[in-house]
Amino acid sequence: MKGWILRSMWGGFVGGLSLFAMSLGPAWVFDPNSNEVILWEHADYKGVSIRYSVGTEVSNLTNEKTGGMNWNDKVSSLKVGANVRLITWEHKDYKGKCVGFLGSNAGGHTDGKYPRLSDWNFNDKMSSLKVYDKDNSDAGCP
Ligand SMILES: [Ca+2]
């Protein structure tokens, strides 16, 4: 009887712990802080991800490597931190079509979440980017 009670309590503890991890996990892993962006390989924030902070400039995503792949023409979804303006280009060296993605405090009536870049005809096209503070006067497409 005593053994059964111990096992029962242990089972309840593990169950509670996993529920706790589930409630904290996604928010901690998958949301940027207010000065970051996170890019994902697939739509709906799936696949490999990469994180950048305000001030980062990447002239050629071919040189950005995580999980055995490079990031040129790979980004399919992204989230933008509240105080960020993310400016992205179709080609390396900030050339070609330019698309800006705003965080929730950066104007533009957005929640900073972009689950399908295909909605902007920009799926698997991004090749360079700059991560700006929302108040930086340079933060826009040329
Ligand atoms: Ca491209």
Image (cartoon, rainbow, N blue to C red):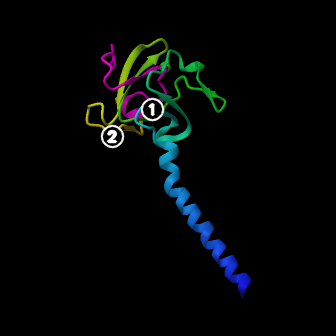
Q: Which mark is residue 107?
A: none
Q: Position of residue 96 (x, y in %)?
A: 41, 14
In the rendered view, would you say 89 is above or below 8?
Answer: above
Q: Which mark is residue 111?
A: 2
Amino acid tagged 1 = Glu
Q: Is residue 92 magenta?
A: no
Q: Mark 1 or mark 2: name the one nearer the start of the chain.
A: 1
Residue range corresponding to the magenta coloring = 117-142
In the rendered view, would you say 105 is above or below 58?
Answer: below
> Is label 1 in a helix, a strand or a loop?
strand
Number of labels in the image equals 2
Residue labelled with disc 1: 36
Q: To which quarter of the image does residue 47 belong?
A: top right
Q: Residue at x 36, y 23 (%)?
A: 99
Q: Is residue 120 magenta?
A: yes
Q: Nearer the viewer, residue 24 or 111?
A: 24
Q: Residue at x 42, y 31 (%)?
A: 35
Q: Position of residue 49 (x, y in %)?
A: 55, 35
Q: Residue at x 49, y 57 (%)?
A: 23
Q: Position of residue 61 (x, y in %)?
A: 54, 20
Is residue 124 found left or right of 6 in the rendered image?
Answer: left
Specify the quadrant that holds the N terminus.
bottom right
Observer-side mark, 1 or 2, equals 1
Q: CA distance from mark 1 to mark 2?
A: 14 Å
Q: Residue furthest right?
A: 3
Q: Position of residue 44 (x, y in %)?
A: 46, 42
Q: Residue furthest bottom?
A: 1
Amino acid tagged 2 = Asp
Q: Nearer the viewer, residue 111 or 34?
A: 34
Helix, strand or loop for the magenta stretch, by majority: loop
Q: Residue at x 37, y 25 (%)?
A: 133
